[in-house]
Amino acid sequence: MNNRLSPWNLGATLYMPATREDIADAVMHRKIPGLRSLVICLEDAVSDADTPAALANLKHLLQELNEAKPTSTKNDWPLVFIRPRHTEMGKWLTEHFDLAAVDGFVLPKFTLGSLPVWWSFMANTHLCLMPTLETEDVFDLLQMRDLATRLETHPCHDRIIALRIGGNDLMNVVSLRRPRNMTLYDGPMGYVIKMLVSVFSPRDFALTAPVCEHIDDPAVMARELSLDIAHGLVGKTAIHPRQIDVIEQAFMVTQGEHSDALRILNSTLAVFKSQGAMCEPATHRRWAAGILERARVYGLHSEQSDEAIRLLPVTQHT
């Protein structure tokens, strides 16, 4: 998988209904500041009645993107994904639409049982996969272990950018909605996210964080983002453009973290003290590598001001 398709490049993944007519501007003309990735949604965000119009709009959008592609490096574009309604629609899209300008599919309601169906028509495409874990199976540790074991050896493995955790669908399974003053971690999803990280992360699968639907409560979102990062999640679903900058800021690395990461990866000492904490290269090496990759993409927080320090240009590279 090339560097452009690194899971760290997902950032705030904005979901946009396929009925919207401004998606081309968001992709080609960077009309949404800071947008790194977007999902053109044909599933929950589109009603049954609007599906034909959404497909027609998507076809026109793809024509625009494909025509613009030869005169663009496309590295300046955000990553573009489509979320089909179901496997039948996914198959139909690959057969009837030119998907050259699309980076991949988000696979809704993904399970071990649906894997062969998705792969049967995606195997011979260029499309990457972002399976969404959002069904009743996700609450079962054994089923998640079986899924992780299968994905680890399946031919699709190298095409999976990240697994997406579908928070709202999972809360619906247990007939709940998060209270307005709480993070997702304060309810059953706290267990689910911990379990998924424990099952999938040791197998080197990246996981993205669910959406925070409380758009006008920055305090809750800030608390939730700190917990997302503490659990090692690599990006977060966004449903409003003003969430993007908040998510970007949260994924920046502190100068202290960056300094520790560099020392851990370069030290010849078995153990050393830094900033009041023990650093042990043998056990902190993977954390340090992740910190440097995050810093490369998002930059460093300036601890003396509100400004950020960028280590490399934000532009994504192949």
Image (spheres, rainbow, N blue to C red):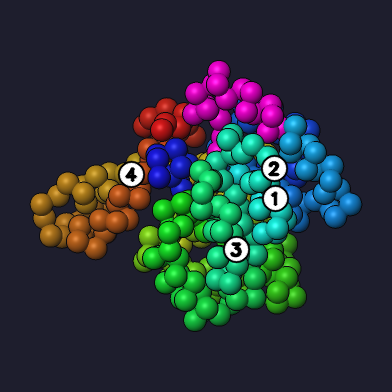
Q: Is residue 188 left or right of residue 296?
A: right
Contact between labelled residues 4 and 3, with CB atoms less than 8 Å apart? no
Q: Are marks 1 and 3 in contact (CB under 8 Å)?
A: no
Residue at label 1?
92
* Residue placed most toward the observer, 84 or 190: 84
How far apart marks 2 and 1 lie (CA) works out to: 6 Å
At a point 56% along the width and 59% down the height, the residue shown is: 120
Mark 1: few/some/many CA within 10 Å (<14, 14-19, 20+): few
Q: Amino acid at mark 4?
A: Leu
Q: Label 3: which residue?
A: 117
Instruction: Say what amino acid the circle numbered 2 marks.
Output: His
Instruction: Residue 4: name its quadrant.
Output: top left
SS class, disc 3: helix
**CA separation, marks 3 and 2?**
18 Å
Depth-wise, is mark 3 or mark 4 nearer the camera? 3
Q: CA distance from mark 4 to mark 2?
A: 41 Å
> Marks 3/4: CA distance?
37 Å
Q: Which label number is shown at residue 292?
A: 4
Q: Is residue 149 visible?
A: yes
Q: Earlier in the sequence, mark 4 or mark 2?
A: 2
Q: Is residue 248 left or right of residue 4?
A: right
**Side of 103 relative to 314 (left or right):** right
Going from the N terminus, do you reach mark 3 or mark 2 first?
Answer: 2
Residue farthest to the top, as pictured:
71
